[in-house]
């Protein structure tokens, strides 16, 4: 239903700004006649001269409006905070981030889509199927992360109780309350890990944030050294820097894509006849040995020498073998 027309300049300017924000972009400009018609639908009287003044006022205040020439030309909002590609990137990240509750994810996606004109919002929705969520609810993890960040920013220690799940999916809590000075958050294996200084053991350790409960920021000043968290991030085979080694692998050429995906862009590849040599820093832990055992016929471990000898002399044993695991830990630590 149309409302009575009025000519309040402030109403007209704000109404025109909203119309341009919601309905225009460089590919969908709005000609002057259409702007007048849309304002009339909103019950706002206008004419060309007044609209030109409004457009000039918008540009003066940083609300960037531009004109596209041509038969289908017109005015459009040019100064959006994010372009289409940037906004799609943010929306894709929100869509696949597992630690957002479903209701919050839907709300965020709606709000992000609202940053672009109606005509292009359909391009911003690109459905993605997510794996089942973990046992711990995303909202709980977000609360833990909020308190970890608060402790990091205020340089205070955290107090919490860790837990594990039993086969019945019940939480089994540790008998000790931990006091830990946070040093950073690491992302590994689709989850957050807290790198912290344990006040009792006087050592650095990693804690899964989805296995932390009763988390409180204490009044105690943070203690311990300040390590570089990047040294603890050792994808793709774990996050235990005391087992980091530079390895050389002789690989069949057909595995180039697999090696790049698994070892990342930092891996060095050198051709060697029908093979290539891959050199990378990895964690020599169970995940590495399990991966290597899957490629026994196509990958040869060349170095470090102790690991190569251990692997070959024990006939490439299963990584879970107790004697093998003990030997690996003795050399790696």
Image (spheres, rainbow, N blue to C red):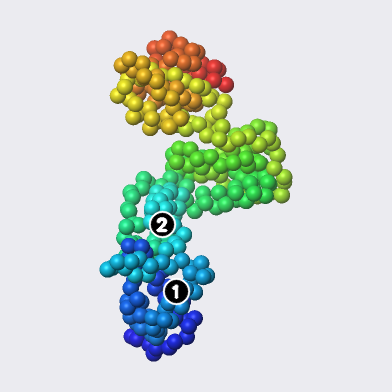
Per the model, the C-alpha gap separating discs 1 and 2 is 21 Å
Tell me which residue sits at (34%, 26%) in the image.
256
Q: Is residue 243 above or below residue 195?
A: above
> Is 330 positioned to the left or the right of 295 in the image?
right
Query: Could you tell me how many numbered marks the image carries?
Result: 2
Q: Which residue is mark 2?
A: 83
Q: Nearer the viewer, residue 287 or 250?
A: 250
Give residue 55's mark: 1
On the image, the x and y values in percent for residue 125 come to 34, 57
Residue 173 placement: quadrant: top right
Q: Could you tell me which secondary element the residue under label 1 belongs to?
A: helix
Tell me which residue sits at (38%, 53%) in the image.
85
Q: Residues within 10 Å of mark 1 (few under 14, many from 20)?
A: some
Q: Nearer the viewer, residue 210 or 13?
A: 13
Q: Residues within 10 Å of mark 2 (few under 14, many from 20)?
A: few
Residue 222 placement: quadrant: top right
Tell me which residue sits at (49%, 16%) in the image.
304
Q: Is residue 293 above or below residue 98?
A: above
On the image, the x and y values in percent for residue 317 come to 40, 16
Q: Nearer the viewer, residue 327 or 323?
A: 327
Query: Which label's residue is closer to the chain start, 1 or 2?
Result: 1
């Amino acid at each position: 239903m149309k409302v009575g027309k009025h000519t309040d300049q402030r109403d007209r300017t704000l109404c025109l700004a909203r119309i341009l924000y919601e309905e225009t972009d460089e590919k969908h400009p709005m000609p002057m006649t259409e702007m007048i018609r849309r304002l009339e639908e909103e019950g706002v009287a206008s004419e060309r001269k007044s609209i030109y003044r409004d457009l000039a006022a918008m540009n003066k205040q940083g609300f960037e409006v531009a004109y596209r020439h041509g038969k289908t030309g017109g005015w459009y909002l040019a100064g959006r905070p994010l372009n289409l590609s940037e906004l799609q990137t943010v929306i894709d990240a929100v869509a696949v981030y597992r630690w957002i509750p479903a209701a919050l994810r839907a709300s965020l996606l709606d709000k992000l889509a609202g940053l672009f004109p109606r005509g292009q919002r359909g391009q911003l929705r690109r459905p993605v199927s997510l794996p089942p969520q973990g046992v711990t609810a995303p909202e709980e993890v977000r609360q833990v992360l909020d308190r970890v960040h608060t402790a990091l920013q205020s340089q205070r220690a955290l107090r919490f109780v860790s837990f594990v799940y039993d086969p019945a999916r019940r939480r089994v809590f540790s008998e000790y309350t931990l006091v830990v000075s946070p040093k950073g958050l690491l992302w590994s294996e689709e989850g957050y890990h807290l790198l912290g200084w344990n006040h009792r053991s006087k050592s650095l350790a990693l804690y899964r944030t989805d296995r932390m409960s009763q988390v409180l920021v204490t009044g105690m000043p943070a203690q311990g050294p300040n390590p570089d968290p990047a040294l603890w991030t050792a994808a793709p085979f774990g996050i235990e820097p005391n087992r980091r080694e530079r390895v050389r692998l002789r690989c069949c050429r057909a595995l180039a894509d697999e090696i790049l995906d698994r070892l990342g862009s930092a891996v060095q590849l050198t051709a060697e006849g029908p093979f290539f040599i891959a050199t990378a820093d990895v964690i020599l832990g169970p995940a590495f040995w399990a991966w290597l055992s899957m490629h026994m016929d196509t990958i040869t471990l060349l170095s470090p020498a102790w690991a190569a000898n251990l692997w070959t002399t024990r006939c490439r044993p299963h990584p879970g073998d107790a004697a093998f695991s003990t030997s690996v830990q003795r050399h790696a630590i």
